[in-house]
Amino acid sequence: MGSTIELNDTLKLKRGSNFPSQLAVGSVYEFSLDGRRVFNLAPSRVFLVEEIDGQWNYVGHVRILVQTIDAMTDKTSGRFEVVSLYPAEYVQLVNQHEAPKGRGYRPPISES
């Protein structure tokens, strides 16, 4: 017998689903994810990633304030505080170097 619990230093939330529409440093938001996960708790930082069409867009750091693992529904939920948001030029670099290979988000090129 065994149990499957995933250890995470990254909170990845889907655009249009559970990723907050507006982020502000110091603000607290709720999250809910399928599966059982354990996140690093405050004061440790956790990367915040917005999943956009399967691609990873790193946006900043958060602190996990509360987390609950529900074995009946196989969900993990909780609250996080935004600690920092990355500037746009840094987002491009971190998406290129930290995302799983081939998964770093690249915004569409706009034609002017």
Image (cartoon, helix red, strand yellow):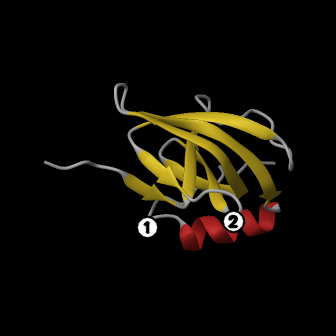
Q: Residue at x 80, y 56 (%)?
A: 83
Label 1, secondary structure: give it: loop
The mark that comes first in sequence, 1 or 2, is 2
Q: Position of residue 84 (x, y in %)?
A: 81, 59
Q: Residue furthest left?
A: 1
Q: Residues within 10 Å of mark 1 (few under 14, many from 20)?
A: few
Q: Is residue 103 above or below residue 74?
A: below
Q: Check disc 1 and give the amino acid type.
A: Lys
Q: Is residue 5 left or right of residue 29?
A: left
Q: Which residue is at the front of the view, 92 or 63? A: 63
Q: Which residue is at the front of the view, 96 or 43? A: 43
Q: Check disc 2 and give the amino acid type.
A: Gln
- Within the image, what quadrant is residue 100 found in? bottom left
Q: Position of residue 94 (x, y in %)?
A: 64, 69
Label 2, secondary structure: give it: helix
Residues at discs 1 and 2 in contact (Cβ within 8 Å) = no
Q: Which residue is at the front of the view, 15 or 44? A: 44
- Residue that badge 2 annotates: 92
Q: Residue at x 58, y 28 (%)?
A: 17
Q: Residues within 10 Å of mark 2 (few under 14, many from 20)?
A: some
Q: Position of residue 103 (x, y in %)?
A: 48, 58
Q: Is residue 18 above or below residue 23?
A: above
Q: Residue furthest top?
A: 73
- Within the image, what quadrant is residue 15 found in? top right
Residue 35's label in the rendered image is none
Q: Residue at x 79, y 61 (%)?
A: 86
Q: Is residue 88 above or below residue 76?
A: below
- Residue that badge 1 annotates: 101
Separation of residues labelled 1 and 2 (CA atoms): 14 Å
Count of picture labels: 2
